[in-house]
Image (tube, rainbow, N blue to C red):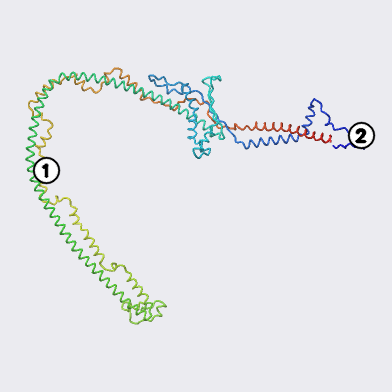
Amino acid sequence: MKFRPLDSRNTSKIVPPPEAYYHSQDEVSLIELWAILIRKKNIIIITVVVCFVLAVGYLLTEPKVYKSEVSFAPPQATDIHPFNTIEIAGFTGFTAEALYSRFLSTISSNAVYRKVFDEAGVASVMGGEDEDENNVLFQEFTESLQLHIPTKEQGADYSQPASLYLEGTNPELISRYLNAVVKEVNSQVITEASAVVQQKIDARLHQISQEIARSREIAVRKRQDEVARMIEEDSIARQQILDEIAIAYSKAEKERLAEISRLQEEDSIKRQKILDEITTLREHASLKREEEIVRLEEENRIKREQIKDTISSLRSNAKAKRLDRIAALQEAAEIAQKIELTGVITPFAQNDAQRKQPVIEGFGLANMPLYLLGEKALRAEIEGLLSRPSDDPFIPDLRSLQDQLKQLETNEEVEALKARQDDDPFIVGLPKLLDQLKQLETNERIEALKSRKSNAPFIPELIELEARLLRLENNRLQEKLQSRVNDDPFIPELRKLELEEQKMRTFLLDTSQTFSARIDQAAYPAGAPHKPRSDLILMLGAMLGLMLGVLFAFFAHFITTARLRKSASG
């Protein structure tokens, strides 16, 4: 809407200013505000849409954070029953409250969190490569870890469950980690409690062992004192009889040793005579064997020299024949070269090339001259003969001579004589001498004297002395005390201690179904993210867009009104 400016030519008609230029009254008309919003609805809609799009973008870019929770309560009496099944002096067992308190103090330990973090491989899942990165990842992973324990100040009682919370971007990982933490804490607490029970058992076992050992030691001392008293009473009388018996035994022993010495001296003289004869025969056999070895080696040496001379002569003849053959072939090759005969001329030509060569009548292959073989064949044969490294393959009977020479180098008869370590089987008359020597070495009379275990049967007065000694030693009570190997039946209270010890040693603490806390609710992967909340973010985005849209609408209306006022006043 345009207004015409006032001038001197149009002063009769005054155009009133627009309604917007009137001074507003104090009260605000809601209808006018609503009309403004209706006029500026495009701004409001655009602002709402922009804010809503920004909220959607934020939800799409912001990582989803999941929250898992595991709750646990105090154990029941059946959960800790194995710890209270054994009676130990001075130990009343564990209460559920004590084990649960230890569970709560252990689960708040950062060392447990780190141990489970390392054992569960959380760092590898999160991409940790070294120790420093693992430490940083551990701090980030456990930053949102919270332990909630109801306290008495909050009006909670002992039986209310506690909870352990953890937030993260991997719901399966954090739920598995929480369950592993609870399992590890329970394992540590049960292990500590088991160690305490075992320490109590070991201490009681040690105490029982000391009591049993002390009781047995006292019983042994009492029995030994009684035996010592009885022994001392009989020792004097017994000693006199023992001295007489010892003298009789000594006399009999001297007589036995003297008889053994006499018989051994006689056998020694006979044995030495036979040994001298055996030594003479063995020396003679050794000399004879050495002479035989020398004779056989000399014969072998002469035969080897003869064979070597024969081989040398054959090789010389073969070399001379080869040189003669080379000379004849060289001469024939020169003749063939002079007559320009390169191919072989035979009485019967086999091909066109041979047919062109002249055929000599009356010559066969056996008696034809060498030059008819052609220069090429003759030169090839000469070259082969000159390059021959050895004439041995062309010498008849050479290999046979070499085999004979090799056989002579290892004469089995000579080797057998040299390897012979004993000539006794080849000495005539030696077995008879050895039998005589063996008979002397086993003198039955000497062996009987040496194998005599006791001289008692040869001591006439020994029977009377032993009868007197037996009467002194026939103390039945003393014998029973000395032969007693176990004083346990005579020790009061011993069986009771042994029964308690056996019970302690056979006690088996089964902690497979023992728990220091009862899992009220295990941690499970969250189905929906905890943060950010999409419904709340979208609602806040829409509300913020609406508020900003209204604000922008009023601001745009204010700008438009200001411009109109400015143009109207101008």
Which of the two labelled residues, at mark 1 and mark 2, occupies the earlier sequence position? Answer: 2
Relative horizontal placement of residue 459, taking residue 364 as reference (left or right):
left
Packing grade of label 1 (10 A; few <14, some 14-19, many >=20) is few
- Residue 144 percent coordinates (x, y): 55, 31
Q: Residue 282 carries which label?
A: none
Q: Quadrant of the N terminus?
A: top right
- Cα–Cα span, label 1 and label 2: 176 Å
Label 2, on which residue? 13
Label 1, on which residue? 438
Relative horizontal placement of residue 134, taking residue 402 as reference (left or right):
right
Which SS class for mark 2?
loop
- Residue 402 percent coordinates (x, y): 25, 63
Q: Which residue lies furthest to the front in this view?
A: 8
Q: Quadrant of the C terminus?
A: top right
Give the camera-side residue of 189 and 151: 151
Are dots 1 and 2 in contact, CB under 8 Å? no
